[in-house]
Every structure is written in C-alpha cells, then in structure tokens.
C-alpha cells in the first residue's frame, strides 16, 4: 500500500516547497507563462497525460467529469509502465503531481492520483 499522503497534487503556478518530494509534471503541454527554471521539476511525464482528443473533448466541463475519468483510466491502461513507475516512486517517499488546470477538483492529476493509489473511479 502506498500512503495517500505520499501522492500530492499541486498547480504549476504554486511555488515548490521542501515537502513536495519528487515533483513530476503530468501535463502534455508546458504550463503557460511558467519558465522552465521556475517550475523545479524532477521529471516531465507528458505521455501519462490524457490524449489531445480526450483533453479537447473534456474541456474541463464538470458535467463530463464522470465520463472523463472512465475514458482517462482506459488510456492509462495503455501506459501501465508509467503508472507503475509513479507507484514505485510513491512507495519510497512523497511525489507531487504538477498540473496546470485551474479547476483543482476536476483535472487529470486527480484521476492519475487515484490510479497510483489503486483507488477506483466512479
């Protein structure tokens, strides 16, 4: 089991902190207006992000949230090795998934965190 506190979420626009552990950008696109030197990430796993088609379809519309979660989890099954890598990292200490979405409750990092922790999607 991975302790839930070992997988954290943080917007790319928030400053890094000592408790972040490994900081991993999980967006396909680089966050707008953020300099690479300012983000302070340990890895950029853009392949684990939702496909361009799924991201465009979702459009951060809360009424599409349930369907987005299911579709994204299916896409994650095609990248099981990346999810396994994130689980391995989280077993050894804190991992912070960095994302740029404004909506902190309805974004791909929320779904990815559940997948890493082995939690089901509604």
Image (cartoon, rainbow, N blue to C red):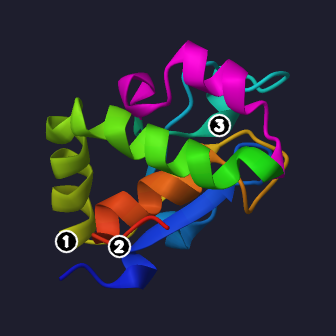
Closer to the chain start, of discs 3 and 1, is 3
Query: What label does residue 39 carry, if any?
Result: 3
Instruction: Determine which quarter of the picture holds residue 110.
Output: bottom right
Query: What label does residue 91 carry, if any?
Result: 1
Please give left or right for residue 10 compared with residue 80 in the image.
right
Indicate whether residue 56 is drawn in magenta.
yes
**Residue nearer the viewer, 62 or 35:** 62
Query: What range of the chain is rendered magenta?
Result: 44-62
Residue drawn 57% across the image and 40% down it: 40
Q: Disc 2 and disc 1: Cα gap in Å? A: 15 Å
Q: Name the residue under label 2.
A: 119
Q: Disc 3 and disc 1: Cα gap in Å? A: 24 Å
Mark 3–mark 1 CB contact (< 8 Å): no
Residue 56: x and y in percent read 70, 19
Please give left or right for residue 14 compared with residue 5 in the image.
right
Q: Is mark 2 on a helix, strand or loop?
A: loop
Closer to the chain start, of discs 2 and 3, is 3
Q: What element carries label 1?
A: helix
């Amino acid at each position: 089991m991975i302790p839930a506190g070992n997988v954290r979420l943080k917007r790319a626009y928030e400053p890094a902190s000592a408790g972040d552990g490994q900081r991993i950008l999980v967006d396909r696109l680089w966050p707008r207006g953020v300099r690479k030197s300012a983000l302070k990430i340990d890895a950029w796993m853009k392949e684990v992000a939702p496909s361009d088609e799924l991201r465009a379809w979702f459009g951060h519309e809360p009424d599409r949230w349930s369907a987005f979660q299911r579709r994204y989890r299916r896409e994650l099954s095609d990248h099981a090795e990346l999810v396994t890598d994130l689980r391995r990292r989280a077993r050894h200490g804190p991992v912070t998934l960095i994302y740029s979405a404004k909506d902190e409750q309805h974004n791909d990092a929320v779904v990815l965190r559940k997948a890493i922790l082995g939690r089901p999607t509604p």
